[in-house]
Image (cartoon, rainbow, N blue to C red):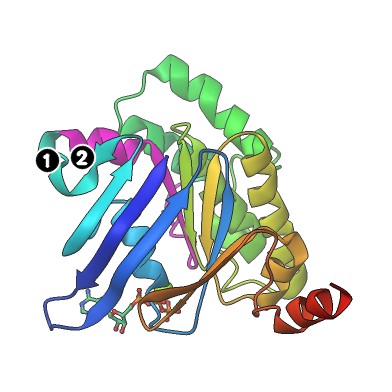
């Protein structure tokens, strides 16, 4: 579904944020993107949401070449991608219900669709009991659940999360990552950029690691840190 071939990104200040990235992500996968600050994680997510365009190589998503995606097709492409950020990004003067409804309104959804879809996604994230609350009346974890509901409103095929647990305590973080896992199990492809060792080690899903813009590790059922000790043990056993 997602394929990057020889992808590089050079920002206008000549900073090389990604270089020669080869990567395939199948429909329905769950992928953690890890690496130290400045490694290129957010840049990768921005390429997939077509916020940035690669300077080298090709990126295809569902058979579409993102570099040559016509401008008029961009809104329709973005609508099918859900995005979640560290700071939740809810509109402070709108209720939980209105925040989710707004994401549908701006895409031209009918009132009937909104009336059906908002309770459905709030239910998915276990927030259907607080539709009238304002963001400042919710905990960080609850706000992130609403932000995830909003990202799911348009039934995206792909959910991108950039440091979704960055502002949350460890226990709440595990709850959010379990929710993202649940959404993945229901069929949505999920890609999570994170510094959070605990959530990566907890789920043991695919991990891709970047160092200075290069993809240096790609493991199924991986951990935050490379598992050299485990490989050694396996070699010793062999
Ligand atoms: N718009 C931009 N213009 C110029 N340089 C940029 C821009 N965005 C990112 N960079 C640079 O590209 C590199 C990769 O940035 P990116 O945001 O992808 O890193 P990251 O892995 O997400 O880091 P962090 O863990 O801190 O979020 C960094 O050196 C950053 O300074
Ligand atoms: Mg980042």
Q: Which residues are magenta?
A: 73-94
Q: Quadrant of residue 102?
A: top left
Q: Is residue 54 visible?
A: no
Is residue 18 found left or right of 102 in the rendered image? left
Is residue 15 found left or right of 159 in the rendered image? left
Label 2 environment density (alpha carbons within 10 Å; few <14, some 14–19, many ≥20)? some
Q: Quadrant of residue 43?
A: bottom left
Q: What residue appears at the point 50 percent right and 42 percent down from the top-left corner?
A: 26
Q: Is residue 56 above or below residue 102?
A: below
Across and down, in percent, residue 148 comes to 55, 48
Q: What residue appears at the point 60 percent right and 68 percent down from the top-left corner?
A: 165
Is residue 188 found left or right of 229 in the rendered image? left
Q: Is residue 34 above or below residue 98?
A: below
Residue at mark 1 to residue at mark 2: CA–CA distance = 5 Å
Residue occupied by mark 2? 74
Outermost residue, right side: 237
Across and down, in percent, residue 136 comes to 55, 62
Contact between labelled residues 2 and 1, with CB atoms less than 8 Å apart: yes
Q: Is residue 38 visible?
A: yes
Q: Is mark 1 within 8 Å of ligand 1?
A: no
Name the secondary structure under disc 1. Answer: helix
Across and down, in percent, residue 7 comes to 27, 63
Label 1 environment density (alpha carbons within 10 Å; few <14, some 14–19, many ≥20)? few
Quarter of the N terminus within the rendering? top left
Residue occupied by mark 1? 71
Is 20 part of what is drawn in magenta? Answer: no
Q: Quadrant of residue 149?
A: top right
Name the secondary structure under disc 2. Answer: helix
Q: What residue appears at the point 45 percent right and 36 percent down from the top-left corner?
A: 156
Q: Is residue 109 above or below residue 1?
A: above
């Amino acid at each position: 579904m997602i394929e990057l071939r020889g992808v590089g990104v050079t920002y206008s200040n000549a900073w090389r944020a990604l270089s020669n990235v080869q990567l395939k992500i199948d429909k329905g996968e769950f992928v953690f993107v890890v690496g130290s600050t400045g490694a290129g994680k957010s840049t990768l997510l921005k390429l997939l949401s077509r916020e940035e365009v690669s300077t080298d190589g090709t990126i295809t998503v569902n058979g579409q070449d993102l570099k040559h995606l016509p401008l008029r097709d961009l809104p329709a492409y973005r609508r099918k991608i859900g995005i979640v950020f560290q700071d939740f990004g809810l509109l402070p003067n709108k209720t939980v219900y209105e925040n989710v409804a707004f994401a549908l309104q701006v895409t031209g959804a009918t009132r009937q669709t909104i009336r059906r879809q908002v309770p459905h996604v709030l239910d998915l994230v276990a927030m259907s009991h607080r539709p009238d609350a304002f963001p400042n009346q919710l905990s960080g974890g609850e706000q992130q659940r609403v932000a995830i509901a909003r990202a799911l409103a348009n039934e995206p095929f792909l959910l991108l999360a950039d440091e979704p647990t960055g502002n949350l305590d460890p226990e709440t973080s595990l709850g959010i990552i379990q929710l993202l896992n649940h959404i993945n199990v229901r069929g949505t492809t999920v890609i999570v950029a994170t510094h959070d060792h605990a959530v990566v080690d907890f789920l043991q899903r695919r991990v891709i690691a970047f160092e200075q813009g290069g993809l240096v590790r790609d493991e199924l059922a991986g951990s935050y840190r490379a598992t050299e000790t485990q490989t050694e043990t396996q070699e010793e056993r062999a």
